[in-house]
Image: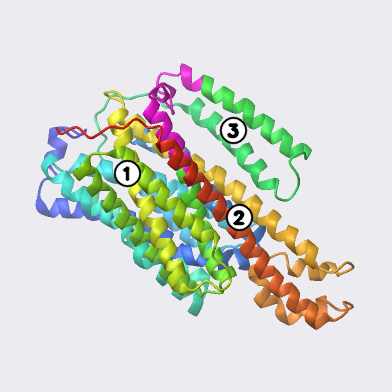
Amino acid sequence: MSPQTAEESSRYRGRTQQNLALAGIMLPLLALNTVSGFAIAAVPQAITSLNGFDRYSWPATAFLLTSTITMPVFAKLSDLYGRKWFYLFGASMCLAYAVLAGSAGALPIPVDGMSQLIAGSALIGLGQASIMVLSFTLVADLFPPLERGRYQGILAAVSIVPFTFGPSLGGWFTDHFSWRLAYYVNVPLDLIAMVTILFTLPGFRPREASRPIDWAGILVLCGWLAPLLLALTWVGQTAWRAPLNLALLIASAILLVVFLLVELRVKEPLLNLGLFRERRIALVCLNLFLMGGAVYGASVYLPLFLQGGLGASATTTGAVFAVYVLATMAGSLLGGRLLSRTGSQHYAAIAGAGLAAVGLFLFSRMAGGTTQPEVLRNVILCGIGLGVLTPTYEVLVQNAAPAGTMGVATGITQFSRAVGGSVALAIFGTMLLRIYHGHMDNLIPLGASAELRLAFDDPLKLTLAKPNLNGAAAGVANVGSVLISLLNGARASLISALQSIFVATSAALAVSCLVNLFIARSTLPED
C-alpha cells in the first residue's frame, strides 16, 4: 500500500487525475534533464567567456557535492512533511540554474562570473537530488501497484531522452547565437513545470513513522569532502606542501575519522558502515568509486577535447555526446539482457569494465589529427562498456544486501560513485593546469611580457586573442614564427593534458576490471 491513507489515495484514481498527476511528476524531470543536456556542449565556451579555465572542473564538482549530500535529506524530509513542496523546490532550482548560469558574469553581485556559474551548478545539484529522489517515489504514492511499472518506465525514458537531443541543440544555440541562450531557452519549460506541480500534485503528507535525520553525519560529511576537494584543486596552482593545502588535508583526514565515528553511533546513519562487512558490497562500492571518476572524467573533458583539441563546433560536440549517451543506453539494455539470459554478474562486470577501459585508452590516443569516425568509435566502445556496468553493479548489490537494507545499500552505491567522481574531477583539474602550464612555460621565450603569458593562460581563448598577440609579443625576436610556435604548442599542450586525464580514467577502469576478478562468481536466482 502506498504511504498515504486509502481515502487520500482514492481521490487520485480517476484517469484525468492520474494523467494530470503524471504530468506534474514528468515535467520537472524533463526540465531537469533538458537544462542539463543543453548545457553539455555550451560549457567550454561559457567557461572561456568567464575566464574560468583554471576552475574548469569546479561546476561539475559543485553539482556532484550538493546532489550527493542532499539526496538522503530530501528523501527523509519528504517522508515527514510530504513531497509536493520539496518537488516544487527542486523545479525552482532548475529555473534558478538556467537564469544564474545564463546570466553569469552579467549579474551585479560581488563575485566573478565563473563563481556565479559554479553557484548555479550547486543549485542544479539540489534540483537533481530532489527531483531524482522524489519523482519515482511519487509514482508509488499516487498510482496503484499494478500500474507503477508502466509509469516508472515512462519516467526512465524522460530521464534519458533529453540527453539524446539536448547536447546537439545546446551546441547549435551556442554556435549560432550565444552560450547563454543554451541556458535561457529552458526557462519557459522550468516555469511550466513549476505551475504544473502547483495545480496537479496533491499536498497530503505520507503517513509513515518519522525517522531521525542524521544531521551530524551530513555536516561532518561536508566538513570532510569540502577541504579535501579544495586541496586537490588548489594544488594545481600551488604545491602539495603549501601550508594551506597541508592544513586542508589534515582537517579532511580528521573529519573523515569523525564522520566514521558518527556513522557508527547514530540510530539512522547517512552511511550504514555495517554493509561493508559484506565482501561483494565493499568491492562493488570500490568499483563504483573508480567508475565515477571515469564517467565524470569522460563527460566533463570530452567536450573540452573536441572543442579545444580538435577545433570542433559546439554543435558537433553535442552530436558526439548524443552518440555517447545512446551507446550507454544500448550498453545498459545489453547488460540487463545478458544478466537475464546468463545470470552471470561476474563475467558481465569484467567485460563491461574491460570494454570501457579500452574505449577510454583510445580516448588517450586521440590527437589533433583524429578523425570523426575514430572519435565515434571510441565513444561507442566507452559508452557500451559503462552502460553494461550500471545494471550489473545494481544487481550485484541487490543480491548481496541483507534483508531490509536494499534501499540503504543502493544509497551507498550512489554515494560511492558520486564521491569517486568528485575526487577524480578535483585531481583531473589539477592535472589539466599543471601539464598545460608546464608545457607552455617551457615554450614562452624568456623575457616575454606578462601580457603575452596571460594570453596563453587559457587555450580556449586564443582564437579570440589572436588579433592582440602581436602587440603582446612586441620586443620578441622573430615574433611571427614565435607566435605560430606558441599557438601550435598551446593546442598540443592542451591535448597532452587531456590525454593524461584519459589515461588516468582508463587506468581506473583497468583496476576495476581486476577488482571484479575477486567478486565471487554467482548467478541470479531463478525465483
Q: Which residue is mark 3?
A: 223
What residue type is disc 3 on?
Gly
Q: Nearer the viewer, mark 1 or mark 3?
A: 1
What residue type is disc 1 on?
Ala
Give the magenta-colored segment's residue range: 262-290
Q: Which residue is mark 1?
A: 348
Residue 79 seen in the current view: no
Estimate the x, y position of residue 237 in percent, counting from the top left. Answer: 73, 51
Q: Quadrant of the N terminus?
A: top left
Question: Cα distance, mark 2 to mark 1?
Answer: 28 Å
On residue 500, which mark appears? 2
- Above or below, comparing residue 395 to residue 256 in the picture: below
* 10 Å crowding of disc 1: few (<14), some (14-19), many (20+): many
Q: Residue at x 30, y 51 (%)?
A: 332
Estimate the x, y position of residue 115 in percent, counting from the top left. Answer: 62, 55
Q: Secondary structure at mark 1?
A: helix
- Above or below, comparing residue 330 to residue 517 in the picture: below
Please check the rendered image and state whether residue 294 is part of the magenta-colored stretch, yes or no: no
